[in-house]
Image (spheres, helix red, strand yellow):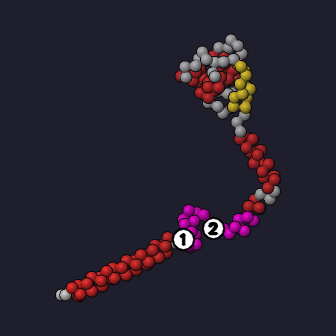
Amino acid sequence: MSKQEAKGIAAGLLFAAILLTAYYFMFSQAKAEESNEVTDAMIKQHLEEKGMVMVAKEKYDSLKAAEHPDNENSATEIKKEEAANKPEEIKFTIKEGMTSQEVAQSLQDQMLVKKSDDFIKALRDMDKEMAVQPGDYTLKADMSSAEIVEEITR
């Protein structure tokens, strides 16, 4: 084999490699894009598997309008529901000289704690039996004993 023949074969192999590389990158990317394409049928199938349905925006808007015919009233109703779900605030006063036991009993009387003993236990666990401060407090009906202890021992 002569030098010229070897150069020709090398050039042919190089040209073939360049063509195969170009072909690979052009067509493999096109296939990858095709496989990542989401169709309406795929979305519909996924929704059906999850127990959901696909509805056009116009249909959704009409259903929403039928559900809440008067948006102003529904906004007012939502505010009323939020207010009803808000925990009740109760004014609570600790007088000068009250003992922890008296405070606990008063909390139970106003239904801020279920048992006065649980409140005393929370005071002891938090090592704040002697830290109760006299004053007026606004406590919420859903506060835990520990939260009440934190509030009245500041």
**Amino acid at the residue labelled 2:** Met
Residue 49 seen in the figure = yes
- Looking at the image, the residue that sits furthest to the top is 97
Which of 49 and 127 lies nearest the eye of the viewer?
127
Q: Is residue 141 above or below residue 80?
A: above
Residue 41 picture location, percent across and down: 56, 73
Judging depth in this view, the residue of 131 and 101 nearest the camera is: 131
Q: Which contiguous range is marked in magenta?
A: 39-62
The amino acid sitting under disc 1 is Val
Front residue of 131/47: it is 131
Is 97 positioned to the left or the right of 146 in the image? right
Q: Residue at x 71, y 19 (%)?
A: 135
User: Which one is nearer the viewer's eye here, 95 or 118?
Assistant: 95
Is residue 1 rendered to the left or right of residue 100? left
The reply to whether dot 1 and dot 2 touch (C-beta < 8 Å) is: no
Q: Where 56 falls versus 87 (above or below)? A: below
Question: In the rendered view of the protein, which quadrant contains the C terminus?
Answer: top right
Callout in the foreground (1, 2): 1
Name the quadrant containing residue 13: bottom left
Residue carrying label 2: 54
- Which residue is pictured at 63% across the width and 67% down the height? 54
Residue for point 70% across, 13% down: 96
User: Image quarter for residue 27?
Assistant: bottom left
* Residue 38 marker: 1
- Residue 51 found in image quarter: bottom right
N-term-proximal mark, 1 vs 2: 1
- The x and y percentages for residue 105 are 66, 19
The verdict on residue 53 being magenta is: yes
* Residue 115 in sight from this viewpoint: no
